[in-house]
Every structure is written in structure tokens, then in C-alpha cells.
Amino acid sequence: MPPAAPYSAAQQRVIAAALELFAEHGVSGTSLQMIADAIGVTKAAVYHQFRTKEEIVVAAVDVELAQVFAALDVAEQGEPGPRAAEIVLNQVIDNAVARRRMVSTLQHDPVISRLLAHQEHFQLFMRRLYRVLVGDATSPEARVRAAMIAAAIGGAVMHPFVADLDDDTLRTELRRVTRQFLEAGD
Amino acid sequence: MPPAAPYSAAQQRVIAAALELFAEHGVSGTSLQMIADAIGVTKAAVYHQFRTKEEIVVAAVDVELAQVFAALDVAEQGEPGPRAAEIVLNQVIDNAVARRRMVSTLQHDPVISRLLAHQEHFQLFMRRLYRVLVGDATSPEARVRAAMIAAAIGGAVMHPFVADLDDDTLRTELRRVTRQFLEAGD
DNA sequence: GTCTATATGAAGATAGAC
DNA sequence: GTCTATCTTCATATAGAC
């Protein structure tokens, strides 16, 4: 996974503001002026922290993915076994709930998708997640099942149907229903 | 539902090109120059068909939603009953598969989301879909279940795990796994 | 680390000819 | 219905002072 990049305090302010704006307007819909305004500085100050807008996008994705990888690492500290899958999935769910405003952007923003498609770390994450979801199966049904569960968790956290559920409730129910979904295929 | 707007042939060319580009780059990442280039005309020609970029977005969403509403209407031609839910869901699945490159954009693009949030027709569609998925239940579990199924269908069709499945296979397996998911909660 | 000022290009949009 | 030409605004990005 990417080493915890030593972002300065000023850089972290840019990243945090950028993530909020990316989640609301998308990457292409977010200008450096908007980021600068959100922090309360000028564009030039932002450009002093990152040389290009692309670098901001990379840093923002980097920070978000670091949390996902950290969660997966923790989950795999335990002994491998039948309960490992549930632990990993719960980590994914917890992370999706905690970062629910960002998850949809990470999964669906065209700019970020292109970025992630070329990141080895992310491809590895997807393969690990796939294995957790359906093991070694490669049948169309297994792949559709994996795609649906992955999309369901990522997509549900931002869904209007659950917009006013608090994190605790959302997390609890997501875990419950995901377990039901997984058992439905056995 | 919106009346089938009488878009001219030239307007339909703009809409078709715009939809492709929106799906690939997002609405904010698509310029009128890109749309004009895709059709092989100049920006001014595009502006002769639609007065603003926003009008193009509205028309594109209009065209896509018309298909969804038509499918729902067909599904509700039959007698209301226990099998109605499955018919509606199958129509939603068929439509999602047929338009798989567009579904993610419709669901997740920030510009389009804002547009849809203010459209009565779309809100009605969501309520109808919710009823099909969980009936009158309003518990957190029911809402999470509905959100997950809705997100799963819409999100799975664009998922890398199923990118190389043909439409027939994807549709068949989506129907199968969705049925399993629905039965898992009973 | 932040500012003012500025360069350069591309965006959305319009006027008027063909 | 399409073009050339143009306007204005905003985008990314840089130079140099404090």
C-alpha cells in the first residue's frame, strides 16, 4: 500500500477541502478557485502546495485509499479462516459508512476511476475483495454476485433511502443485510 | 412521465453524442466543443439546437428516463399482484443492462443527481421502486435493503467484475441473484 | 506560506453570413 | 442547419514580492 505520505498541515487542509468539494461537485466540477475559497486562501497559495490539480486529485485518492488498505491489513492480522471473510467485509462496510460522502466519488467519478484503473495497489485491493466475496469462482453468477455486493455496499451508503440514518444504525443494518445476501447464495 | 419530446434529427444527434461523452467524462468533464467534435460540426451548430449546455443535459436525462418510465408502465399493464414486483424489477434490470454505460452516470453524476432530485417524475419513480422492493416497510433494515438492491443493480452493470459479460448473460444472472437477494430477507 | 498580478487557453455563449 | 468570428468569463498555471 502507499506509504503514509508526509503531507504538511497546509497540504492536508487542501486535501480535506478538495475531498469535500469532489464529493459534492465531482473532480471536473471542482476548480482550484473553489478549493482556495473553501480554505480561505488564494489560488496561488494552493499552487504552492501542489504543482497541478492532478496532484491534488492523486493526493486525495491516496489519503482515502490509505484508510481502506489499513482496514484490510488489520482484518488480515487475524488467523486466516472461514471468519476472515466476514471480518474483511465488516472492515469494508465500516470504512464505507465512515467515509460515506466520499465513497461514491471514489467509485464513480470518471477522473478518479481512470486514476484507480492504473494503480496496482487498487487492482490488488479489488482482487482481494473479489476473493473474499466469491472465493475462486469465476462463473458469470459468481461475478455478478460479487459485483452486486461490492456495488451494493458502496452505493447504498450514499443512497437517498438511507440518507437520514445515523452511522451506527447504517453500519449495523448494512452488516446484517450483507450477511443475508452472502448466505442467499450458498 | 415526460411526453416523448419531439426532438429533431439534429437534436437527437446532439443528445446521443452527449450521452456517450457524459458516460465517459461526466457532465462537467464534457464541453460543448467535445460534443460538436463528436458529431463533426462546430459549437455554433450545437448552440442552434440547444440554447445552453444545461438544456442538453436535461434533454439527455429526459431521453434516458423516458425509457425507464416506459418500462415501468409496461410492467404495470398486467394485473397487480404478487408477481407484479418481479415484473417491475425485471424491467428495471433489463433497462439497466441495455443502457449499462449510461446508468452509472444517471445515478452518480453530481450535475444529473441535482437535476433529478428536483424532478417530480423521478421522485415518483423512486417511490414506486421503493414500494416494489420493500412494500410499506420503513424500518432501517427495510431501507438499507432497498438501497442495497437499487444500488446493486445500477452499480453492478458497470462493475469491472462483469465488464466482459454479454448482455444476455448479465441480464440472466442479475435476475437470478436479485431474486436470491429478495428471498434472503423473507 | 501567502499574497498581487498576470499569462494563456478553453469554456459557455452570441451575431450574422451562407 | 451550419459556418466564421467574436465576446466574456473562468480555468489552469506562473512570476515575484512580503
Image (spheres, coloured by chain):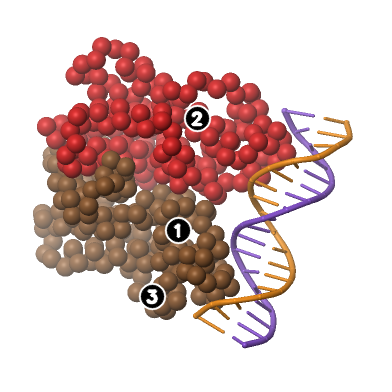
Chain colours: A red, B brown, C purple, D orange
Q: Position of residue A32 (x, y in %)?
A: 64, 43
Answer with mark 3 or mark 1, whichever residue precedes in sequence: 3
Q: CA distance from mark 1 to mark 2?
A: 27 Å
Look at 49% across and 33% down and name the residue there.
Answer: A61
Look at 17% across and 33% down and name the residue there.
Answer: A137
Look at 57% across and 39% down and name the residue there.
Answer: A54
B183 in relation to A89, above or below: below
Which image quarter holds the C terminus of chain A?
Answer: top left
Q: CA distance from mark 3 to mark 2?
A: 45 Å
Look at 41% across and 20% down and name the residue there.
Answer: A70
**Which residue is label 3 attached to?**
B5
Left or right placement of residue A43 versus residue A54 in this view: right
Which of the 4 quarters of the picture holds residue A149? top left
Q: Report how many numbered discs are placed on residues in the image.
A: 3
Q: Secondary structure at mark 2?
A: helix
Left or right placement of residue C13 versus residue B4 in this view: right
Q: Disc 2 marks which amino acid?
A: Asp
A185 in relation to A74, above or below: below
**Which residue is label 1 attached to?**
B21
Q: Position of residue A139 (x, y in %)?
A: 16, 39
Left or right placement of residue A150 versus residue A8 in this view: left
Nearer to us in this view, D7 or A115: A115
Nearer to us in this view, A63 or A17: A63
**Which residue is label 2 attached to?**
A62
Q: Does residue A39 appear anywhere in the picture?
A: no
Label 3 packing within 10 angstroms: few (<14), some (14-19), many (20+): few
Q: Secondary structure at mark 3?
A: loop
Q: Disc 1 marks which amino acid?
A: Leu
Nearer to us in this view, B21 or A18: B21
Q: Secondary structure at mark 1?
A: helix
